[in-house]
Amino acid sequence: MPGRDWHADIALLQEREHKARAILGVPEDAGQQEIRRAFRRASLAHHPDLNGGDEECSRRFHLACCAYRFLSEGEACAALDELDAPREAMTDGKYRLDNPWGYWCWWRERFFGT
């Protein structure tokens, strides 16, 4: 398969996982039980029937369902791809790690101390 870009596929999967974990509010090392508990909390908080049909709550409920399906079953959802990546988690406090220059500066400081 000469036309397939595996790096882009892996980056897309990592981005989806990062977004899904940010939606549910679970850390990277969270297990299935913790993910399920976070989904139940989010679904109860944003369920459209419990919030009087509020459109924003309906959207958040749909995102929580998509995030849970992705983290538990690996099923992709178009709503996750349409979201902007959360920027606050992509920094180390000093450098932005979502671009090559910021990552290079972080790497240089970490390993060479300059």
Image (cartoon, rainbow, N blue to C red):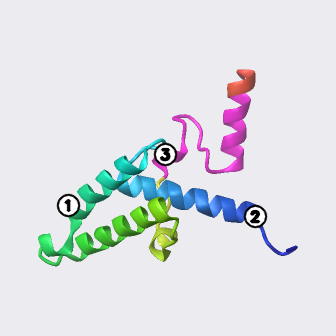
Quarter containing the C terminus? top right
Please tell me whether mark 2 sits on a helix, a strand or a loop.
helix
- Per the rendered image, the range of residues in magenta is 87-109
- The amino acid marked with disc number 3 is Ala
Q: What residue lies at 26% left-to-right and 74% top-to-bottom?
A: 58
**Seen in the image, is 58 located left or right of residue 64?**
left
Residue 89 in the image, given as x and y percentages of width and height? 49, 45
Q: CA distance from mark 1 to mark 2?
A: 38 Å
In the displayed structure, 75 sits above or below 15; it is: below
Give the image quarter of residue 91.
top right
Q: Residues within 10 Å of mark 2 (few under 14, many from 20)?
A: few
- Residues at discs 1 and 2 in contact (Cβ within 8 Å): no
Instruction: Name the element at disc 1.
Output: helix
Mark 3–mark 2 CB contact (< 8 Å) = no
Q: Which mark sits nearer the N-terminus, 1 or 2?
A: 2
Name the residue that disc number 3 marks: 89
CA gap, disc 3 and disc 2: 24 Å
Q: Amino acid at mark 2?
A: Trp
Q: Nearer the viewer, residue 31 or 110?
A: 31
Where residue 76 appears, as percent x and y from the top left, is 52, 71
Toward the top, the furthest residue is 113
- Which of disc 2 and disc 3 is earlier in sequence? 2
Q: Is residue 68 magenta?
A: no
How crowded is the residue under tag 1: few (<14 C-alpha within 10 Å), some, or many (20+)?
some
Residue shown at 21%/69% (left/top)?
47
- Identified by mark 1, the residue type is Ala
**What distance separates the C-alpha of mark 1 from that of mark 3?**
24 Å
Q: Which residue is mark 1?
A: 45
Residue 100 inside the magenta-drawn segment: yes
- Rendering quarter of residue 41: bottom left
Give residue 6's mark: 2
